[in-house]
């Protein structure tokens, strides 16, 4: 029976629907992310970018690892895979090589992709597997309560660097570019339109493409390190972000207090992908 | 193998090849189209042969950066619709354990060949072992069941490779072949039958519309039909405890339903999955239980015992997991004692004791790796229990 409350709720829900809602699994919302987190913006950019590619949505598979970002796959109404910690990339490679028709996207966090999964990341870039990896970099392990990550800035406070971080951080974009990726870009979650366009470009580009999205994590990183609200971090992005397309990624280290360099750092074309090269073995033998 | 590899899946005819090569051929004959692996002694010849053959058959061979990636990538390939496999040995299988768990949880058909060597750790890279038997069953965390088979000849290495794929497809589970260095490095005659004589099973596919499809809704046989990526079914796959939709449900109730079904789909079919060889078992008063390479020495020991007037028999386990508990329970009623021969410090013997409820004497004939039992060594144990 339709109660007045239900009618009102349904009407409001209907009115609130976003044009991209058909790409989301409504029965899984609300999502798990904290207020002030940038993952919602990333997800929003992603669904728009998917639509903009004009590609057949049935042929998209989204794979993620473990962590806050790992939950993105689970909100998408596509073929989605939530795998083990750090192993989204090799799982994605299996999907892509076994069915090259698929557009395979890996969505995961900095800890998942660059600590426990770091080895898979550099080898996937080296092999130039035709997949897209989108990494949310929030400088810490959010889901487990704010521990040290390979991206945590030096001296930053985390629950496992309570005396200040004594390790230097990885520059993710520089690392992936050095390993051979054919598309490398960095944006913040504030650069929504540019991020969306970049996601579209990454999906359409042939070869291993990588986008680093610098993301506020007020709950477990920000409030312990001078960014106690998401807004403060976004303001930092607004004031310090400098777009430098084509810059050598090694000159883009993220240091709080200094300029945050974003942009499309690497756009290479013409490099044969791993799946093309594997397919060519069979074709050579037919000649 | 010659530089130009043959271009058909089934190399029908007589061969004189190693166990590792026979496994490679068995897997190709079974329809394997994806191999992801990492070199490790004593399994590397499987990867080598498949790397030569598979790309010419329209399949994918990829050498991954480690065994963790190897296991993850074959799961991905299976979800793209290809029959997939890896091959490894002790240290590698240890690294694969987490993703074997993911394979169990996500009901992903795939085959893992474990050419056992002596352990723990790096142990005896080039020498035989049977020490990973319990690990196959308990190595990944959590409660689960899977299927493991153990061949004892080059011919059976080929035959069981096909069986491993068929069982993995039928029950939607990772299947481990628990073979060993001796079987895999020995050369024997292998007869590969014509393609038409090889029975191939494929995973059950959904028949309804994608709209009504739930990724993990089982049929009455407890096995869900499997749609894969790119077919429009919008599969939802997670290693988290999930409901029939595949959605994460972090409750004790969901856990109970899921884990029970995952275990039951294997355990309730134990008799159907069971493969054993009975050798002079009918009137045996001393029953030897062995598997893999050890079963060959055990057969010799049974013959030696019979010559000495001891009614010995051999139960050779081909299916190691699920364990044929009911069968051994029944056999224990007709026999006076059991000798379990294995190249480890006593692993399967624990299952045998459990199955027989320790009603009769059960002794272990053990080697700790590096060498195969002689028939005489097993005979000594047979004589020991026969006197009791």
Image (cartoon, rainbow, N blue to C red):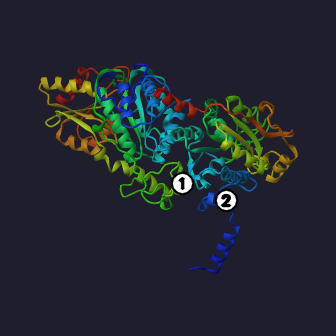
Residue beneath label 1, please? B234
Task: Specify the quadrant of the image occupied by residue A18.
Answer: bottom right
- Where residue A147 sits: x, y (%)? 70, 42
| Label 2 crowd (10 A; few <14 / some 14-19 / many >=20) | few
Name the residue at the front extreme.
A287
Q: Mark 1 lies on which chain?
A: B
Residue at point 81% right, 31% down? Answer: A251
Q: Is residue A254 above or below residue A227?
A: above
Quadrant where the N terminus of chain A sits is: bottom right
Q: Residue placed at 29% from the left, 43% from the top?
A: B325
Q: Position of residue A56 (x, y in %)?
A: 59, 51
Question: Label 2's element?
Answer: loop
- Say left or right for A181 vs B84: right
Number of marks in the image? 2
C-alpha gap between disc 1 and disc 2: 16 Å
Pick the front one: B364 or A59: A59
Q: Residue drawn 39% across and 51% down?
A: B204
Say if residue A229 shows up in the picture. no
Q: Is residue A163 left or right of residue B178?
A: right
Query: Pointers 1 and 2 in contact (CB under 8 A)?
Result: no
Residue A184 visible in the displayed image:
yes
Q: Is residue B107 left or right of residue A61?
A: left
Helix, strand or loop for disc 1? loop
Residue A20 numbered mark, or none: 2
Is residue B92 shown left or right of residue A13?
left
Residues B363 and B311: in front is B311
Residue A9, image x and y in percent?
A: 66, 73
Q: Are marks 1 and 2 on the same chain?
A: no
x then y, percent, for residue B230:
53, 49
Q: Which of A12/B193 is in front?
A: B193
Q: Badge 2 sits on which subunit? A: A
């Amino acid at each position: 029976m339709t109660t007045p409350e239900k009618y009102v709720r349904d009407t409001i829900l209907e009115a609130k629907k976003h044009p991209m809602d058909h790409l989301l699994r409504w029965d899984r919302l609300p999502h798990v992310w904290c207020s002030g987190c940038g993952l919602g913006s990333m997800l929003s950019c992603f669904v728009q970018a998917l639509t903009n590619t004009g590609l057949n949505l049935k042929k998209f598979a989204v794979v993620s690892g473990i962590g806050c970002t790992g939950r993105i796959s689970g909100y998408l109404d596509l073929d989605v895979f939530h795998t083990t910690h750090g192993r989204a990339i090799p799982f994605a490679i299996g999907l892509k090589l076994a069915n090259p028709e698929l557009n395979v996207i890996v969505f995961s966090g900095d800890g998942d992709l660059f600590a426990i999964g770091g080895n898979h990341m550099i080898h996937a870039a080296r092999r130039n597997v035709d997949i897209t990896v989108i990494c949310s970099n929030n400088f810490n392990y959010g889901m487990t309560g704010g521990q040290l990550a390979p991206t945590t800035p030096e001296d930053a406070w985390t629950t496992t660097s309570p005396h200040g971080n004594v390790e230097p951080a990885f520059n993710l974009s520089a690392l992936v570019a050095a390993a051979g990726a054919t598309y490398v870009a960095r944006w913040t979650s504030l650069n929504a339109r540019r991020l969306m366009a970049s996601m579209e470009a990454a999906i359409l580009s042939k070869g291993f493409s990588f986008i680093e999205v610098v993301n506020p994590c007020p709950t477990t990183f920000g409030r312990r390190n001078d960014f106690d609200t998401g807004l403060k971090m976004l303001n930092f992005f607004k004031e310090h972000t400098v777009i430098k397309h084509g810059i050598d990624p090694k000159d883009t280290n993220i240091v709080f207090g200094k300029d945050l360099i974003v942009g499309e750092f690497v756009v290479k074309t013409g490099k044969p992908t791993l799946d093309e090269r594997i397919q060519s073995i069979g074709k050579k033998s037919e000649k | 193998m010659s530089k130009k590899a043959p271009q058909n899946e089934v190399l029908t005819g007589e061969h004189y090849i190693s166990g590792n090569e026979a496994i490679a051929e068995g897997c190709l004959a079974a329809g394997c189209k994806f191999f992801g692996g990492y070199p490790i002694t004593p399994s590397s010849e499987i990867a080598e042969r498949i790397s030569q053959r598979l790309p010419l058959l329209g399949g994918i061979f990829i050498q991954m950066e480690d065994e963790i990636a190897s296991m993850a990538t074959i799961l991905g390939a299976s979800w793209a619709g290809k029959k997939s496999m890896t091959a490894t040995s002790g240290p590698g299988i240890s690294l694969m354990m987490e993703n074997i768990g993911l394979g169990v949880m996500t009901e992903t058909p795939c085959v893992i060949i474990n050419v056992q060597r002596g352990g723990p750790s790096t142990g005896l890279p080039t020498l035989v072992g049977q020490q990973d038997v319990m690990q196959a069953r308990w190595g990944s965390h959590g409660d689960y069941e899977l299927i493991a088979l153990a061949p004892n000849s080059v011919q059976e290495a080929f035959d069981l490779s096909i069986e491993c794929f068929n069982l993995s497809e039928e029950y939607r589970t990772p299947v481990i072949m628990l073979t060993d260095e001796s079987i895999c490095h020995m050369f024997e005659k292998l007869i590969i039958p014509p393609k038409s004589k090889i029975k191939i099973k494929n995973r059950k596919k959904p028949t309804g519309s994608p709209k009504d499809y739930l990724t993990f809704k089982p049929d009455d046989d407890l096995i869900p039909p499997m749609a894969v990526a790119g077919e429009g079914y919008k599969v939802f796959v997670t290693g988290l405890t999930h409901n029939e939709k595949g959605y994460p449900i972090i409750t004790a109730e969901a856990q109970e339903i899921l884990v029970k079904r995952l275990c039951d789909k294997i355990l309730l079919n134990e008799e159907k999955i069971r493969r054993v060889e009975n050798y002079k078992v009918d009137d045996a008063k001393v029953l030897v239980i062995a598997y893999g390479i050890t079963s060959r020495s055990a057969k010799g020991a049974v013959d030696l015992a019979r010559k000495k007037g001891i009614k010995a028999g051999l139960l050779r386990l081909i299916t190691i997991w699920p364990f044929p508990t009911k069968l051994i329970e029944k056999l224990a009623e007709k026999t006076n004692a059991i000798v379990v021969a294995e190249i480890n410090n006593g692993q399967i013997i624990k299952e045998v004791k459990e199955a027989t409820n320790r009603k009769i004497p059960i002794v272990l004939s053990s080697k700790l790796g590096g060498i195969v039992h002689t028939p005489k060594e097993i005979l000594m144990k047979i004589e020991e229990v026969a006197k009791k």
